[in-house]
Image (spheres, rainbow, N blue to C red):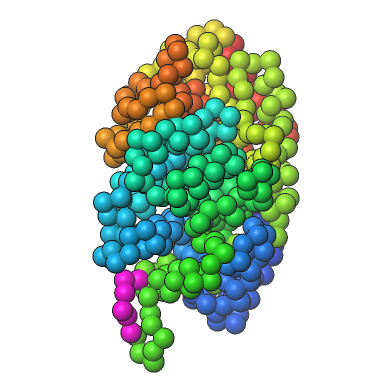
Amino acid sequence: MQKRFEQKIWLSSPTMHGEELAYIEQAIRTNWVSTVGENINELERMIAEYVGVEHAVALSSGTAALHLCMKLAGERLNPGAKPGKALEGMRVFCSDMTFDASVNPVVYEGGEPVFIDTEADTWNMDPAALEKAFGMYPDVKLVVLAHLYGVPAKMDEIVSICRDHGALIVEDAAEALGAEYHGEVVNGKCGSFGDYVAISFNGNKIVTGSSGGMFLTNSRSDADKVRKWSTQSREDAPWYQHEELGYNYRMSNIIAGLARGNMLHIGEHIAQKKAIYERYKEGFKDLPVVMSPFEDKSNPNYWLSCLLIDKVAVCRQERGEKRALYISEPGKSCPTEILETLAACNAEGRPIWKPMHMQPIYRMNPFVTRDGNGRARSNAYIDEDGLADMGADIFRRGLCLPSDNKMTPEQQEIVIEIVRECFD
């Protein structure tokens, strides 16, 4: 067992450079500390220009951005819907392996998530399962797609399928700022492909404002609506006039200052994250594991480096709702053993996102795989014929490794050795 790290090795912590403080101090010095100011304006300009869209609206969180994406989509698909019920009575196809912030806003607006299984090449929404889902639910007109861990989904296929079925796309690019996809149908940066798009500046993201998010669009009218809704839908009147439901979702000028300064270093952060991924890949090349995959047409942002244990090398394990047990076996390991060993050495990893169809809150929702249709099971995984759900199998065998861009190569070598020892 390697000795314990004196300073914790984090999964992915904020990395500050100095400009962030200068912009925050400027906001304080000039007294622009609320939801208007130069930092907000400049951050919106920077992000729109970087991603390649016409408009960006700075909001208090990625979840707020996703909520307003759903509200916009519902308004377009369901004109005249009551406030808070823009998606009432509507099924919405959603990525299954993601954080629940991708899905909850569908429910905020009264919709019913239908989960689409994951594919093995990118760990994102499976186009084959999506096509099958449209055959089962032909009335669906909205797809919520997340790019997992900064790896672009199969956008050529997904966009083509959605166009064929007349469906809108909400693109959850919260984890994928800076990632690129160069396809034949769509080409550019993640965040530029959806009809409505959300990104996040949460504290662990590749660019952070400590919190915050942003709505992206090529529609000026949609940007104006989101800006209005995010400031309690105040009308252009000399007093507080309100004619529709609004929200307190606008980003503060202080948080925008932090994100503005951090955004100056996105290229550096991506390069550092890529180097971490490559060192892991080299360090594990003779272990029964593979690193998280991506297509040749993609350039991920490498936000988190993830590992998948070969099926034959997974030791006996059992997961309940909140606890896990395993039996250590020579030459084998499992996510829980590796994560517990890392934690004992003062290094932070994390399980792969537990698929939404396995979550207690959503386990009765429809769930579609390329080979069948079923509901969650506590022990769901790929069976001998490869017919069960892919997302549950990745959850069973995968984990997120320490991916902090301040981790030195020497520290990462120790992390690699810790993981290797789990297979002894």
- In this image, 214 relative to 133: left or right? right
- In this image, 86 relative to 35: left or right? left
Q: Residue 383's x, y, as percent?
A: 42, 15
Q: Residue 146's x, y, as percent?
A: 50, 44
Near-viewer residue (50 or 255): 50
Residue 142 seen from this side: yes
Residue 96: say if magenta: no
Residue that appears at 49% across and 72% down: 221
- In this image, 53 relative to 279: left or right? left
Quarter of the figure with residue 51: bottom right
Q: Residue 312's x, y, as percent?
A: 53, 10
Magenta stretch: helix, strand or loop mostly: loop
Residue that appears at 68% across and 53% down: 266
Residue that extends furthest to the top in the rendered view of this protein:
330
Check the image and report above or below for 371 versus 55: above
Near-viewer residue (57 or 314): 57
Near-viewer residue (256 or 323): 256
Q: How many circles with numbers are drawn on the protein?
A: 0
Residue that appears at 55% across and 81% down: 31
Find the magenta span and give its range: 241-246
Check the image and report above or below for 229 versus 407: below
User: Which quadrant, please, contains the N terminus?
Assistant: top right
Q: Residue 35's x, y, as percent?
A: 49, 74
User: Which quadrant, please, contains the C terminus?
Assistant: top right
Residue that appears at 44% across and 45% down: 165
Residue that extends furthest to the bottom in the rendered view of this protein:
238
Residue 178 seen from this side: no
